[in-house]
Image: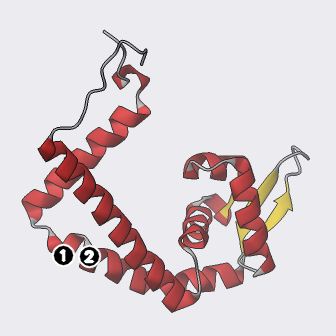
Amino acid sequence: MNSSDQPRWLDDEQQRVWRQWLRSHRELNAAIARQLQDDGGLSDADFAVLVSVSEAPDQRIRATALADSMLWERSRLSHQVRRMETRGLVQRVECEQDRRGAWVEITAAGTKALQDVAPGHVETVRRYLFDALDADSLAALDRITQTITETIDCPAHAISPA
């Protein structure tokens, strides 16, 4: 935006919806974080890494691919994996084809930690999100989140100056 452009301010309804969206997102994330900590001593970042690695073929994934899939900077992933390695949840294995790269693998302890928190995680998500929605609301939420994701991910949707 250049100095002569006027901002496209949110109207009252948009402002209310935006703030409600932020609040619901924060509260849902806080409830999930509490559950993960209470049930297994995991942070939400620990859980996200464990889920991603456990769902990868052979329960291992290149560190760069993991960072990309999580939309994290490589340095953030490196620090997170280091902390998780210290606790025995994952391990880094040198990539034989490319000595500069590394695989992140889930360990038996990481698998157990994931299994320990999974039932409570699903219950928390169900209780605070899905149980509150009827079929029409769920379909609307699906459409809305899909549209938002596509708008953010697609450069063609970027707002350009007129």
Query: Split into 4 quadrants, where in the image is the N terminus?
Result: top left
Q: Tell me if residue 28 comes above or below residue 6 in the rendering.
A: below
Disc number for residue 128: 2
Q: In the picture provided, is 17 more to the left or to the right than 97?
A: left
Residue at 41% across / 85% down in the picture?
Answer: 119
| Residue to which mark 1 is pinned | 131
Measured as percent of width and height from the top left, residue 143 is found at 21, 46
Question: Which residue is at the far front?
Answer: 3
Query: Mark 2 and mark 1: span between their CA atoms?
Result: 7 Å
Q: In the picture provided, is 114 more to the left or to the right than 76?
A: left
Disc number for residue 21: none
- Type of residue at label 2? Tyr
Q: Secondary structure at mark 1?
A: helix
Residue at 37% across / 78% down in the picture?
Answer: 122
Q: In the rendered image, which quarter is residue 135 located in?
A: bottom left
Q: Tell me if residue 123 comes above or below residue 27 in the rendering.
A: below
| Marks 2 & 1, CB-CB < 8 Å contact | yes
Q: Tell me if residue 27 comes above or below residue 102 in the rendering.
A: below
